[in-house]
Image (cartoon, rainbow, N blue to C red):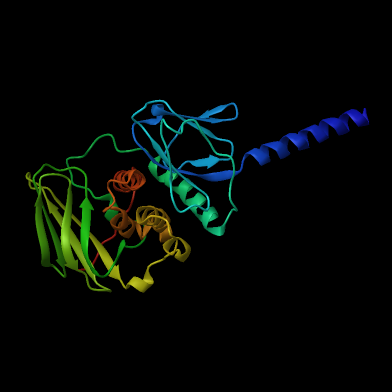
């Protein structure tokens, strides 16, 4: 009986050991066109639904189902993407490189990204104007002070809109917009100052929100990703994911600004949409002029 129990126990250990051998991180899905039905990822007996920033493992087999579609992946330790299309499909990931500190950090950002993008979206838009980016539970959101464009997006109200940026109640920039988004060009933001944003719609509704500015050396930064040789859109997106979670959301406005220029990069665009439309409940704090 003892021998039988010993063999069963040994079998369990070997099974777990084999599973761990198979579960070796190999890289991630960076981008793809079409939809998830255009691709099949086989992992042993499982079929994995492809999503951007999902983690790939050694042994995964990626197949293209539609001739016109392709998928872009990055393998650990590589600075260039691998494009998988009909010509090299099915593509099997056969080996992994050394797990680095940077990969462990990136893997956590991929998990954070999934949490951000899985937040339920608001299904009904209020007649009132609202900008979740400027809401925070503790302190006003912050922006790095420099000469820069400012990207804004909001919900509700009736177009057209007028957007005005104020410093100490003095207008410094104004722009009209037919949609619930606007890019304010080249504003010289001064450090350690408070700013207001006013949005007026065609029905007389008004939104007022604010943010404060800080010196660039006050911004949290993960130097290893900033110094990596990955494409700038990947660096900025991963940095923004991390930044948005710092200090209970204090840096979410700055995180949004950093990814807003990359609207053609799918992970950045999906993160951007999640940051501006999340259904979280916030307490708005006042901001002095």
Q: Position of residue 245 (x, y in %)?
A: 42, 55
Q: Position of residue 255 (x, y in %)?
A: 34, 57
Image quadrant containing the C terminus: bottom left
Residue 53 lies in quadrant: top left
Q: Residue at x 32, y 38 (%)?
A: 121
Q: Residue at x 25, y 64 (%)?
A: 287
> Depth check: 202 or 13 in front?
13
> Depth check: 237 or 177 in front?
237
Farthest front residue in view: 87
Relative side of 77 to 250, left or right? right
Q: Position of residue 236 (x, y in %)?
A: 36, 56
Relative side of 247 to 1, left or right? left
How many badges with numbers are in the image? Answer: 0
Q: Position of residue 188 (x, y in %)?
A: 19, 70
> Depth check: 34 or 51 in front?
34
> Depth check: 52 or 202 in front?
52
Residue 168 lies in quadrant: bottom left
Relative side of 165 to 3, left or right? left
Relative side of 26 to 241, left or right? right
Image quadrant containing the N terminus: top right
């Amino acid at each position: 009986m003892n021998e039988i129990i010993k063999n069963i126990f040994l079998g369990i250990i070997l099974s777990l050991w084999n599973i761990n051998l198979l579960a070796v991180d190999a890289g991630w899905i960076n981008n793809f066109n079409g939809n998830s039905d255009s691709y099949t990822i086989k992992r042993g007996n499982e079929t994995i639904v492809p999503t951007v920033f999902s983690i790939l493992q050694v042994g995964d087999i990626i197949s293209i189902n539609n001739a016109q579609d392709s998928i872009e992946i990055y393998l650990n330790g590589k600075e260039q993407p691998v494009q998988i299309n009909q010509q090299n499909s099915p593509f099997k990931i056969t080996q992994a490189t050394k797990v680095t500190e940077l990969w462990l950090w990136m893997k956590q950002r991929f998990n954070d990204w999934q949490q951000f993008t899985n937040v339920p979206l608001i299904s009904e838009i209020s007649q009132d104007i609202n900008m979740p980016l400027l809401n925070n539970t503790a302190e006003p959101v912050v922006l790095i002070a420099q000469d820069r464009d400012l990207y804004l997006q909001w919900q509700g109200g009736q177009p057209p809109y007028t957007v005005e940026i104020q410093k100490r109640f003095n207008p410094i920039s104004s722009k009209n917009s037919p949609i619930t988004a606007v890019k304010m060009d080249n504003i010289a933001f001064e450090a350690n100052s408070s700013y207001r944003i006013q949005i007026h719609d065609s029905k007389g509704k008004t939104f007022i929100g604010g943010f404060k500015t800080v010196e660039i050396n006050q911004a949290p930064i993960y130097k290893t990703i900033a110094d990596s040789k990955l494409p700038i859109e990947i660096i900025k997106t991963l940095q923004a994911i991390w930044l948005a979670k710092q200090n209970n959301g204090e840096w979410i406005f700055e995180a949004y600004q950093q990814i807003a220029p990359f609207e053609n990069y799918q992970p950045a665009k999906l993160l951007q949409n999640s940051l501006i439309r999340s259904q979280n409940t916030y307490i708005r704090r006042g901001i002095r002029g």
